[in-house]
Image: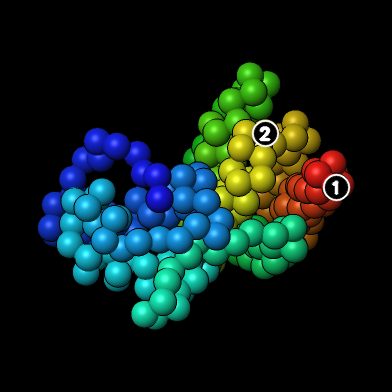
Amino acid sequence: MPLPPNLRKVERTSAKNKVLQQLQTWIIDGTLQPGEKILDTELADAIGVSRTPVREALQILELQGFVEMQPGVETRVTKLAPEDVPNIYRPLIALEALAAELVVPKITDAVLDELTELNRQFSEAIETSQSYAAMELDEAFHKLIHETAGNTYISSFTSLLHMHLRRLKFVFFQHFLPARTSVEEHRLLIQALRDKNAAAAVEAMTQNWLRPMHEVARQLEKANKGDD
């Protein structure tokens, strides 16, 4: 199980959370590959903690859907398949659309200005092919809407789905660059929020997620045919 060398050892306090964050990162970015067997003793030695916080973190990761555990037998990173595309995107679309509806009465000029600036930076990252920066800016754009909407359940569930989506992009595409169309979709969403038009906001948000879902599915289908 190859792991990055010279890891900074974590302190005993909040060890579980730090182990959890580290494992999430490794699973999402492909350091720990889909289907790979996880050894808690090896992880504990690499991160510099006891086996207890590692086991606790793995239990949380199982609930989140990142690992599959067979007690007393083995623990493996959950595999990914093309059907995971709609399984991840569809609930995310529903939650994002709800956030767009709920945020309308709470939107302020300050938030609109911040969304506009995030979208400007997002556009710049796409134009300069900075795939990781573009992905982070896109997530920040949507996170701001979630936070402003003020529904903690939407924020929590979308955060988890975004992690699964990021993993899907990393594993299947390595350097996934959002389409330039996303920038215009963000602009339409911002305008709908500025106009206090909930229906238009929901429509713009839904389109902003439906289009990439279909595009990712097409690319995966194309890649799978190429492997045949």
Q: Position of residue 215 (x, y in %)?
A: 81, 46
Asked whether, in this view, residue 105 is left or right of residue 186, the answer is left
Residue 84: image quadrant is bottom right
Residue 96: image quadrant is bottom right
Task: Work out whether residue 94 can be spotted.
Answer: no
Q: Which residue is drawn at 24% across and 36% down?
A: 6
Q: Residue furthest bottom?
A: 71
Q: Residue at x 29, y 55 (%)?
A: 42
Crowding at label 1, few (<14), some or many (≥20) Cα neighbours within 10 Å? few
The amino acid sitting under disc 1 is: Asp
Q: Where is residue 120 in the image (x, y as percent from the top left)?
A: 61, 28
Task: Work out whether residue 121 can be spotted.
Answer: yes
Residue 118: image quadrant is top right
Q: Is residue 50 above or below residue 173?
A: below
Residue receiving disc 2: 177
Numbered label attached to residue 129: none
Q: What element carries label 1?
A: loop
Closest to the observer, 137 or 131: 131
Q: What element carries label 2?
A: loop
Q: Position of residue 191 (x, y in %)?
A: 71, 42
Please tell me which of labels 2 and 1 falls first in the chain.
2
Asked whether, in this view, residue 149 is left or right of residue 179, the answer is left
Q: Residue furthest left?
A: 12
Residue receiving disc 1: 228
In whole angstroms, how far apart are the C-alphas of marks 2 and 1? 25 Å
The amino acid sitting under disc 2 is: Leu
Asked whether, in this view, residue 30 is left or right of residue 225, the answer is left
Q: How many marks?
A: 2
* Dots 2, 1 in contact, CB < 8 A: no
Q: Position of residue 78 (x, y in %)?
A: 55, 64
Q: Which residue is drawn at 38% across and 54% down?
A: 23
Q: Which residue is drawn at 37% across and 73% down?
A: 59
